[in-house]
Structures are given as C-alpha cells and as structure tokens.
Amino acid sequence: MGYDARGGIREPVDRALQRLLRRAVLDHARATERRRLYPPALHVGVPGIRARRFEVVDELDHALRTDVVEAMLRPAVDTGVVPLLWLTRRGEREQQDADSEWSAAVAAAGGELGLTLGLVVVTRRSWHDPCTGVGRSWQRLRDRADGR
C-alpha cells in the first residue's frame, strides 16, 4: 500500500495511504499528553482503527529495537496481514536520531520476517518517510470527512 519494492513511500502517494497517515497525525495531535517532554512511541496497525503501541522510555540498542518491532508485527503477520508502522514523536519534520534508529530496526525486522517494511514518522503537524523524504505537513490540521 504505497510502498515500493525497495521499501519507502514514493510520489505519487496512494490516496488511501494519505488518508491513513493524515489520521495518524490527527490522532497524535489530539493526544492528551500532559508531559512537556514525552518519549517517542512506535505504533503497528491501522491509524484510527486498531494499533498496538510501544512507548520508548529507555535507550534500546539496535537488536532490542528490532526485537520490539518483530514482536509487535508477529501477531498480524501470522494471520497474513502486513500492518503500517509509524513512530510518533514531538518536534517538527526535521530528521531526529530516533527516526533513523527505528527505521533501521524496522528494516532489520522486515528482513527477518521476509517482508519489505517501511516506517513513517508522525508529528503533531506532519508525517514523513525518513528513507525517501516523502511527506505532508499542515499549518492547521482539521478533521474533515474527505480526508484531505
């Protein structure tokens, strides 16, 4: 769904994928996070429908991040479904260390599972693919029925 054979989102982005990622941004923007500084969280599933969440509270090495991704994916993959993976974090669209670290873990877990996987980074006003740079940003994000 919107990923090419090398992994990652490419232009033109599939309309259904755009809607799902916009939903992920809306959900993240609406989150009632009271802490000023909050850790990133990895999500596996379908935005707005059903997702598993792992809040990254400690520094993890690459092997542990890969194990987390694989463990979160395994239930869906065992049923023949390849869900979307996204990392929510604070800040803007600029690249952060967590983006690269979790993107590498997703790629490694995909290799172990025999799948081509990608990660999307979601902030309160944008989403982007850290591998390809493709993304969307909004100044004011509104919940519209048409998903644009």
Image (cartoon, rainbow, N blue to C red):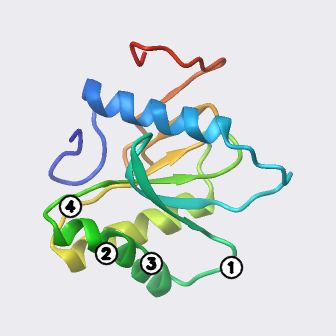
The first of marks 1 and 2 along the sequence is: 1
Vertical placement of residue 29 versus 147, above or below: below
Any part of residue 43 in sight: yes
Helix, strand or loop at disc 3? helix
Q: Residue at x 43, y 55 (%)?
A: 51
Q: In which quarter of the image is the N terminus?
A: top left
Describe residue 55's horizontal placement relative to residue 76 as left or right: right
Name the spot of residue 110 as percent of width and height, x first.
26, 70
User: Alpha-carbon neighbours of circle 1 within 10 Å: few (<14), some, or many (≥20)?
Assistant: few
Q: Residue at x 66, y 17 (%)?
A: 140
Vertical placement of residue 145 versus 58, above or below: above
Vertical placement of residue 137 versus 130, above or below: above
Question: In the depicted view, which residue is nearer to us: 21 or 5?
Answer: 21
Q: Mark 1 points at which residue?
A: 58
Q: Are marks 1 and 2 in contact (CB under 8 Å)?
A: no
Name the spot of residue 95 as percent of width and height, x first.
59, 50
Whole-angstrom CA distance, mark 2 to mark 3, is 9 Å
Q: Mark 4 points at which residue?
A: 116
Which kind of residue does numbered mark 1 sit on? Asp
Helix, strand or loop at disc 4? loop
Whole-angstrom CA distance, mark 4 to mark 2, is 9 Å
Name the spot of residue 10 as percent of width and height, x first.
28, 36
- Where residue 129 sits, quadrant-wise, is top left
Q: Are marks 4 and 1 in contact (CB under 8 Å)?
A: no
Q: Mark 3 points at which residue?
A: 68
Q: Nearer the viewer, mark 4 or mark 3?
A: 3
- Where residue 81 sits, quadrant-wise, is bottom left
Question: In the depicted view, which residue is nearer to us: 102 or 16?
Answer: 16
Q: Name the residue under label 2.
A: 109
User: Alpha-carbon neighbours of circle 3 within 10 Å: few (<14), some, or many (≥20)?
Assistant: some
Which kind of residue does numbered mark 4 sit on? Thr
The first of marks 2 and 3 along the sequence is: 3
